[in-house]
Amino acid sequence: AQSVTQLDSQVPVFEEAPVELRCNYSSSVSVYLFWYVQYPNQGLQLLLKYLSGSTLVKGINGFEAEFNKSQTSFHLRKPSVHISDTAEYFCAVSEGGGNKLTFGTGTQLKVEL
Amino acid sequence: GAVVSQHPSWVICKSGTSVKIECRSLDFQATTMFWYRQFPKQSLMLMATSNEGSKATYEQGVEKDKFLINHASLTLSTLTVTSAHPEDSSFYICSAPPGGRNSPLHFGNGTRLTVT
């Protein structure tokens, strides 16, 4: 069975600083990987996805993530954060294609002035 | 494009009553939709997969008689919480894949259910 681990429940960072949100997964088969962002009392918005091909994936709002198969990781990065990036970020995995997602526990990114 | 609309955005009901939540794909057809539940400051847990024209597939531990799912058309799935109790209070979110199987899910804005 697949699982997703987000070790950091909360990440505080100053505005314009870089940030990395960590995500590790476990699966016995090939996976598709996703990062979603959730603003308070809203649904989830897709930031980026890895399905195949280049391991460096660029998404919306200046975010990017790198798929590392040997380390089973898919960390999310942004070189310079903005106050508006304050939100909850979820890493998710689906095994072998298909739409059924397993989510990590989420990381609260708090950007401060 | 590829909007998933969920209604209502919030609802308060009394214990013992039933509540229906609608999930619509506005500009695409979805043979499959997914219902998630999210407790405060926790992750999303998949409750069930809604299948157009057939029975929903429920995840282990989810009571199918309590959480009734109907997917009557290619653009509408409904979740009915029957005989609601305070412990059913939660944030319910639906999702659908605009591009069919293997495409990323698009999510509705969720429904905050409070049972008093």
Image (cartoon, rainbow, N blue to C red):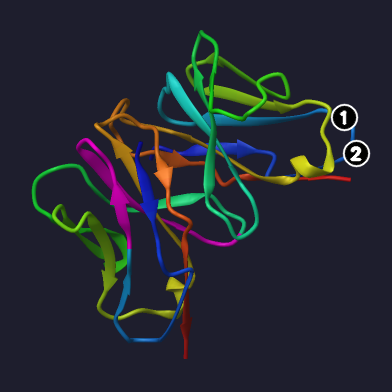
Is label 1 in a helix, a strand or a loop? Answer: loop
Q: Amino acid at mark 1?
A: Thr
Label 1: chain?
Answer: B
> Badge 1 local density, few (<14 within 10 Å), some, or many (20+)?
few
Q: Evaluate whether residue A40 shows in this view.
A: yes
User: What residue does disc 2 label?
Assistant: B14
The span picked out in magenta is: A23-40
Q: Is residue A88 left or right of residue A95?
A: right
Q: Position of residue A28 (x, y in %)?
A: 24, 37
Q: Evaluate whether residue A63 shows in this view.
A: no
User: What residue does disc 1 label?
Assistant: B17
Q: How many marks?
A: 2
> Badge 2 local density, few (<14 within 10 Å), some, or many (20+)?
some
Label 2: chain?
Answer: B
Residue drawn at (64%, 30%) of the image: B22
Q: Which image quarter is the N terminus of chain B in?
A: top left
Q: Position of residue B37 (x, y in %)?
A: 60, 42
Q: Position of residue B103 (x, y in %)?
A: 29, 34
Q: Nearer the viewer, residue B9 or A76?
A: A76
